[in-house]
Image: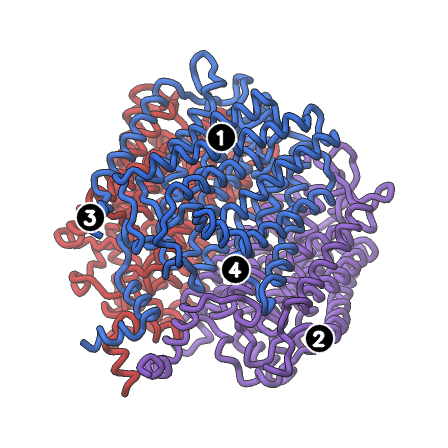
Chain colours: A red, B blue, C purple
Amino acid sequence: MPAYATNMRLKFPIVALILEAVTIVLYALFVEYDTGDAHGHGGGHHAEGNTTHPENPMTLYPMFQDVHVMIFIGFGFLMTFLKRYGFTSVGINLLLAAFGLQWGLLLQNVWHMQNGKIKVSINSMINADFSTATVLISFGAVLGKTSPVQLLIMTLLEITIFCINEHLVVEVIGASDVGASMTIHAFGAYFGLAVARVLYRPGLRNGHDNNGSVYHSDLFAMIGTVFLWMFWPSFNSAIAEPGSAQITAVINTYFSLAACALAAYATSSLVEKKGKLDMVHIQNATLAGGVAVGTCADMNIQPFGAMLIGIVAGIISTLGFKFLTPVLASKLGIQDTCGVHNLHGMPGILGGLAGIVAAALQRKEGASAAHQAGGLASSLGMALVGGLITGLIMKIPFWGQPPDQNCFDDSIYWEVPEEEEENEEHSAHAEYSKNKTEA
Amino acid sequence: MPAYATNMRLKFPIVALILEAVTIVLYALFVEYDTGDAHGHGGGHHAEGNTTHPENPMTLYPMFQDVHVMIFIGFGFLMTFLKRYGFTSVGINLLLAAFGLQWGLLLQNVWHMQNGKIKVSINSMINADFSTATVLISFGAVLGKTSPVQLLIMTLLEITIFCINEHLVVEVIGASDVGASMTIHAFGAYFGLAVARVLYRPGLRNGHDNNGSVYHSDLFAMIGTVFLWMFWPSFNSAIAEPGSAQITAVINTYFSLAACALAAYATSSLVEKKGKLDMVHIQNATLAGGVAVGTCADMNIQPFGAMLIGIVAGIISTLGFKFLTPVLASKLGIQDTCGVHNLHGMPGILGGLAGIVAAALQRKEGASAAHQAGGLASSLGMALVGGLITGLIMKIPFWGQPPDQNCFDDSIYWEVPEEEEENEEHSAHAEYSKNKTEA
Amino acid sequence: MPAYATNMRLKFPIVALILEAVTIVLYALFVEYDTGDAHGHGGGHHAEGNTTHPENPMTLYPMFQDVHVMIFIGFGFLMTFLKRYGFTSVGINLLLAAFGLQWGLLLQNVWHMQNGKIKVSINSMINADFSTATVLISFGAVLGKTSPVQLLIMTLLEITIFCINEHLVVEVIGASDVGASMTIHAFGAYFGLAVARVLYRPGLRNGHDNNGSVYHSDLFAMIGTVFLWMFWPSFNSAIAEPGSAQITAVINTYFSLAACALAAYATSSLVEKKGKLDMVHIQNATLAGGVAVGTCADMNIQPFGAMLIGIVAGIISTLGFKFLTPVLASKLGIQDTCGVHNLHGMPGILGGLAGIVAAALQRKEGASAAHQAGGLASSLGMALVGGLITGLIMKIPFWGQPPDQNCFDDSIYWEVPEEEEENEEHSAHAEYSKNKTEA
């Protein structure tokens, strides 16, 4: 790989340490504890965010930990489905989220400073975790085709743009988006797809040997899927108004996901000629109900309404994987590794639309259809423009991007244990390996 | 496999979608939020269930999530020990539980409707999760030998019968069963064993190549074991009377499991001629203490009493795996894939017996030995009869059951990644594979 | 292996059952529920321990479960990185912790008996879990080179000595150590290193084939890493004074870990000549920030202070793995399998030093630099002396220790599935295997 400077030895540590150093300086200047004595409001995210504190500053802590598990185990392991890319999936997921939460907490609260200080509470930690979700969604679109340096840059830029859009949607436009179908899921997906478009690799048009799973990598991915599925009610309700709105968000998400699972399984079997289930669908489309019910999770849509949203989400998500993803790659040059368009993109838009309908039907006090539509439009617009610009910056041939043949392969950025490599090689290319061992 | 119509393409989606459609219609008619304003009582399960709500409707939410993890990660991954059946174990576990919780929530609350409506609260969600546990236990008995369609039918029928028995035991007979040793564990086990008896496969008498583990599949199973072990105190206490009964249930379960672990390890080593530990015992028998202490978890049996129950459970469970399971298969025609008789059956009965003794010793106000004995008898009787009938329905040769040679193999109902299959084949049948690659 | 009596059939069950039997007798005599009616104080650990109960006895339960996950999933899976030692890592981890928590709960509360009784509450269960952490840290140092019997003995002795030191540090010396950098992490590490020194095996000087990872074992280990990383805020805050001290401990730990992750990644890349990331560093050094911020987690060091501590910890931990661990093995005869010196030893001392500085700067009321220094000295001294004595007892050639060639291999104490072994052999020694299958 002579033309590619993929050696990270200086670039990566320098970028990582500069980002962290700048962050620490900003924290030293602006960030302090909010131990619950004052009654300010936490980080943005949406209208519900600016409630006064619950009396016990730890009330939301169990929900914070659920969200934390979704970010670090859920997103991280969901992407381990690739046979030779598990180290990056779970490892770089940790890196990006660890930086992203520090950066997100800063930027989300720029608009809410008190006496020139940002106050850290469990509420703002939840919102900071949320901000990283956008990046992890976009990460899924470009998984296998980017370097850690590129991804750190994407994290910096995407979270910055996310915080602007979130402020716009929630505070300026006044849309309601408690589970963030629009501001996180649709935003993260279309941002990532725009980046993927800019980074289009013609050399991967005909696929890549390592762009697939093996049996146990699919099981690792199910760890991510199941934790996401279980804790999604916490994601959609964590920053809801305490009391009936919060429990409503829990219940709606629980039922949306349950119904979505059945729809995803049924559709997966239906679209395959032998009626077999496809792990890609199960790992992803079962979660689409959580995404799609996000915007109206705290609205009075009744359990059966949530279930209907979940079913539609499960169906379109599965169909997307089967029929749309290949077309996006071949016709539009959008190579979406994890199919984030199907899990976050379309279900996110569906969530936004459901929110418009629910607002029109007056399912939540104070939410109007027009404001909801504005929130969706802003999220999509900012995502596409932001993603294109970010993609162009990431495309500068200096960030150590991998050559095509080393895509989807941990060993370009990681020390990988030797035997196993031999083993994998052995099984994947048995002929070649046999010759080698005979030589 | 000419005689078997294992193609699921129509049967499976149709059954799944019909079940979901019927469920949604019933939800539209009968189910609404319980946001904590009214002071009704949640879903059945047992006498403790009908307490008034705690003031904050989210109080039980962390415990609900623990139970949720046990159902979806715990049961799901525990069954991934089979070398080629991990997709089904964790994937169909998700499917059955996702449908089961919707169905269970409906039926458990038929007896508790208010103004013709079923109210959903965290309490009823916990009970709904519980109802699915019965099916997942029975699933363990028939694992590898049934189609997804058969299992959906079993879910529908078993949860229906479970809800009737639970109502009988708790409301009519008036037995106490806070951790559900009788109504969930013994019931689920003997129901599953009855189904397994009806579905007896002589062709599997001499074992099956795929009915065993590989190194990493045993590690995946330990994810399930450890999460079940850790969160069992939540299972046994989630619906206990808040306050001292609840904390008593936590403490008793914690100590029962700790003592059980030592007993299981010691017994495992003792029954093997080289004194080695057997993963099957560790994965399962370490949990028997949680099952056995269930009925009297909220009773004043003191920590050492809980530990004694745990030790007995750990010992009989391990001995059951070693000596009883082979006999059940060869003499009684009960092929119990996961050994649920050892983890849930015998320890469940032990739990019921311990409850009788504890009630006789007046360890809980209002519990009588006779009522406890009635609860145990009802659970066993309903399980056996219900399981036999369910098994007969499942036996109808239309549900896509796998032929003997395809048992314990995901690839009959799932797309399985090719390389890995080759790999597995390659290693397991190296000679054959070598010839093939040379050809 | 003629000279080694590694058959555990009698030794192991007898030792395990005697320990459990003695424990139960002591529980029958001395232990009873604390259901929150009385207002005593829970188990020791540190000055914060002796607060009166919160009004609801279940308040700390979600934090208890987080700590529980760290102990059983976190520590257990972190050690599964070895290619053939996953059964022991997660399985014996469960055994030792299950016994350890029973023993620890007894000894930690000997000094706090009320009317001759030890009261069990969530608080004392958290402290009991903590006590097992010391053993699991030491386990990491001797992983692969000890028998289950030796490890049970180590558990008994180490927890006993830990409880004495904890009482000394917290109650007698009066040092503050909320996250237990000194009393758990430094203590557990240096205790384990002392044991490892006594058990030095010259035969492993040149490494061992099985003392390494394979691709999927590294992924299993990441399950442990990520759960530890996520829940560390609970570890450091669980027994903090409720209210502002507790939330401060959460926030400090959250930021210390986030900053530590970036430092660990940057340093890992920097010290490798091709700039690649090393899984060993990522699995461990990312956690050093949680250890190092432990002592002053509840002090007013501000978020940026916590981040600085995290960064230093991440850097020294990574450098330790790269440069110090090989030297410890070759020059000092300390073979530290998991590198606990780098994850718990040095960061633990760093935490102790940070506590001294923070106390000197009056960051916590009532904490003095001299008391902090005394606490650190006591922990290190007790660990080294206790570890040496324990190591000598463990060295008695009767406990079934493995011969050098069987180190790092589950199959000496576990039934291991056959195919996989063949598979592993096949891939690792393809030449040999090929010949064998041709024969």
The residue carrying mark 4 is B279
- The amino acid pointed to by label 2 is Phe
The residue carrying mark 2 is C398
Which element is circle 2 on? loop
**C-alpha separation, residue under disc 4 versus residue under disc 1:** 32 Å
Can residue A24 be spotted in the picture? no
Can residue C283 be spotted in the picture? yes
**Which chain does the residue under circle 4 lie in?**
B
Question: Which mark is nearer the camera, 2 or 1?
Answer: 1
Compare residues C396 and A165 and report the one nearer the observer.
C396
**Which chain does the residue under circle 3 lie in?**
A
**C-alpha separation, residue under disc 3 versus residue under disc 4:** 36 Å
Residue C184 point in image, percent of width and height = 68, 60
The residue carrying mark 1 is B382
Residue C354: give its label.
none
Whether residues under marks 3 and 2 lie with C-beta atoms below 8 angstroms apart, the answer is no
- Indicate which disc, 4 or 1, sits on the residue closer to the N terminus: 4
Quarter of the rendering occupied by the N terminus of chain C: bottom right
**C-alpha separation, residue under disc 3 versus residue under disc 1:** 38 Å
**C-alpha separation, residue under disc 2 versus residue under disc 1:** 53 Å
